[in-house]
Image (cartoon, helix red, strand yellow):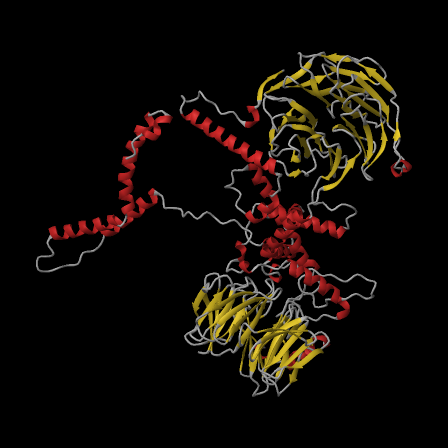
Amino acid sequence: MEVALEDNNLMEKVLPPDEQEIDVELEAKEKKYLRGEGANLESLKDKKLKTQLASREKLYGKSAKAAAKIEKWLLPASAGYLETDGLEKTWRIKQTDIAKEVDLLSSKNQYDIVLPDFGPYKLDFTASGRHMLAGGRKGHLALVDMMNMNLIKEIHVRETVRDVAFLHNDQFFAAAQKKYSYIYARDGTELHCLKERGPVARLRFLKNHFLLASVNKIGQLHYQDVTYGDMVASIRTGKGRTDVMEVNPYNGVVALGHSGGTVTMWKPTSQAPLVQMQCHPGPVSSVAFHPNGHLMATSGKERKVKIWDLRKFEEVQTIHGFHAKTLSFSQKGLLAAGTGSFVQVLGDSSGGGGYSRYMSHSMVKGYQVEKVMFRPYEDVLGIGHSMGWSSVLIPGSGEPNFDSWVANPFETSKQRREKEVHLLLDKLPPETIMLDPSKIGAMRPSRRKEKPTRGEIEAEKEVAIEAAKSVEMKKKTKGRNKPSKRTKKKKELVENAKKTFPELEEKNIAGKKRRIGEDAAAELPTSLKRFARKN
Amino acid sequence: MRIKTISRSVDEFTRERSQDLQRVFHNFDPSLRPMEKAVEYQRALTAAKLEKIFARPFVGAMDGHRDGISCMAKNPNYLKGIFSASMDGDIRLWDIATRRTVCQFPGHRGAVRGLTVSTDGNVLVSCGTDCNVRLWSVPRPSLEDSDLSSEKSIEPSAVYTCKNALLAVDHQFEGDLFATAGAQLDIWNHNRSQPVQSFTSGSHSVISVRFNPGEPDILATSSGDNHISIYDIRMSSAARKILMRTKTNSIAWNPMEPMNFTAANEDGNCYSFDGRKNEEAKCVHKDHVSAVMDIDFSPTGREFVTGSYDRSVRIFPYNGGHSREIYHTKRMQRVFCVKYSSDATYVISGSDDTNLRLWKAKASEQLGVILPREQKKHEYNEAVKNRYKHLPEIKRIVRHRHLPKPIYKAKAESRAMNDAKRRKDERRKAHSAQGTVVTESHRTRRIIKEVE
């Protein structure tokens, strides 16, 4: 009986395994909402400031905890997934198999639109994923409401269209055409002709900054503020023509891929690139950024796709064997690569950074994929190709829960208008584009480098001398192997090792001299100290 | 094979009827909001700028007096009422909402120097240089009164005469005693024509008197011989005295920490004292460039307002060395009296140019009924401003105040003088034997001695 009672007590103290798991999960989520480590308050001397900051940190902790709990319990939807049993492999599952399993609403997202006359097509989605813009190479522009598959407007510009991009919402879009780029309204009215940039190859819109970035045929990078039409920056990259351009959503830095295999990153406030990376030996064919901004994927014509860590600018992984014409990351971090009539989706199944095959999709032979792009907040991949555009289901690619204040697929026109005003109020100046945006709103740390202390230098010197002493001498011939010669050589080595620490020598002398001066000054009254001889 | 994909039916995410509210969903994931810190900083900057744009503190002037305003009194019973008195003996009751005179109290010959209202709000006590103390019964506020523009005049309920001119009066917080200051400090009862008690000290007159809001028997006075004295009226002489280098024009007790009081000094500074520990000031509030004439605490006890001879009104935090706000207009002359309204939203100043001026206590505050969403927005703006207040761009905008040229010049001059003095002291210290020259802290510098 007694033993049983003790057991009961133990059971009460230790949480059941379910709750333990939940605790661990909540802690991991909390970390995300804390947005980095708190400030180190130990070194602060100001007590008042210390308590103020401590209470603030406490508040941050509380709000992170609340947010984690909300994520755990209150969010309306959970992410999609694709799981297999036994020998089944996820990448062997075809769209037709998926169509049988999923609900009717989702299966509506699998379709091919065949438009053989004006392809290949470029695609762009609005931030909420509600609207899609398709631009055919031969001049066909179509604006589609994806919710009810309603063609809002279709126009034909009767000249080459190289790229299309939505501006801040579905009301405006830009198209890079044969000679100039144009901005159109939702109803197809031409609003602006942007002549200054010349024949543009790629267009991208920076949402937070309201900048329309473009690279033209002669390799010039232009940034234009779309709110008041000012050309914020025009940069000559000096790397020749390119049509590989992508924006890092994390910091607004624009990356260009060049024919020499380099990827360069740019901001509008400097004429020189922030970063130049030699990514491939041959031409770079496409670049994509992970939404958290830490990973970049590049593909080269030498049939390799590489994943890079942008915090260290190091290669994380090389995927051999296919040349991706177009790459795209989804909100949940899946990577789609399109080549020929084949689209491969890579997933980071372990979460440790290793991308491996997740799904694949092959289209009718002869279709040439032009652009792949994940639809935000949906498990859908849009593929623009030479014969129109297609849409396939990729379970687990999209963020299941949208925020009405960030991007709302069910936005009413009143909400859209309200949103536009808020976006404009929160518009960021071009100076805020930088590699590490966490520096904004923070104090600059003092520039002085910490010098190694005297003790550290001395220790280093000791080590160097020891190393010099323990060097094995070669056996020489013709009288050079005499003991006297050997000791002399050894002494020389030690002397050389000592010479590598000149600051220590100088300091010794200076320190001695100063000590003499200090003694003299210490004896004098304060008023006469300034007359003390300075050695 | 198990598959799930995101599928949202339109019905779940939109409202059912057009009368319903729109459905709102939240996802606090930081990865959905790129550059959120930069956006927040931008919002802080916008909030700081908006605060400047909306900073319109002047609400209106109340004119009617024919001479400079000498003193004011709040009506504790009625938020909208304020009494003011001028140098020509005119006393008026104002309705702040309409900014009109409600009634007048004629009778004083010569300047009225002191005005106070009993805590129940029924009796107004005035005193002046004509050696008279007059008691008036305050008319009951009614709806008709505030609407009528016709000015009534009221007869005093009692007139008591004493030998000397009177300079200040203050009413006890609980009880029916009031104190007048002149050549001596007198304690009066409403119903007696002679003072109940008198305190004399030296040959100099008492300038100001203020009862403690916590202890009804304790009062603080300041006198022409640079003393600040604390009296307990149950005893026969002053309990404590502080001798300062310059005269103190007015004293205000902190209503929330009633052991602390702040003295408005002739040297342009205000000194906050702990009534129990007087050898050094708790805080020195510097910013005025000329004598501080009057001081009044906000009912919250966190701020006080001062009026100065340099033609400006400033609002200080109770524990801060510098003012958070300065109010001035081209037309406002020497400010002789200031009051913080009983709801802590307004500040009223009376100046030499015969006008009472009504200011907002927070210059950019939105008045009137605020909707909950507006309130949220104001709170958010305040929070982001507070978060980034140390960054140079925002600090500059938030701190900037336009100063009138004379004040700006006087400030620069006094800064130069202070710097020179500091340098001189440093040198003197360096050229003297160690320990012979002691730098005195600002909190004790202007205090000569403290007498128990």
The answer to which image quadrant residue B62 occupies is: top right
User: Of all residues shown, which one is farthest toward the front?
Assistant: B66
Q: Position of residue A161 (x, y in %)?
A: 58, 80
The answer to which image quadrant residue A142 occupies is: bottom right
Nearest the eye: B160 or A276: B160
Q: Position of residue A229 (x, y in %)?
A: 60, 66
- Residue A172 visible, this orientation: yes
Q: Position of residue A252 (x, y in %)?
A: 55, 63
Q: How many marks?
A: 0
Residue at image coords 30%, 44%: A458
From the viewer's perspective, is B325 left or right of B14? Answer: left
The answer to which image quadrant residue B81 occupies is: top right
Nearest the eye: A295 or B139: B139
Q: Position of residue A299 (x, y in %)?
A: 48, 74
Check the image and report above or below for B375 versus A177. above
From the viewer's perspective, is A496 left or right of B164? Answer: left
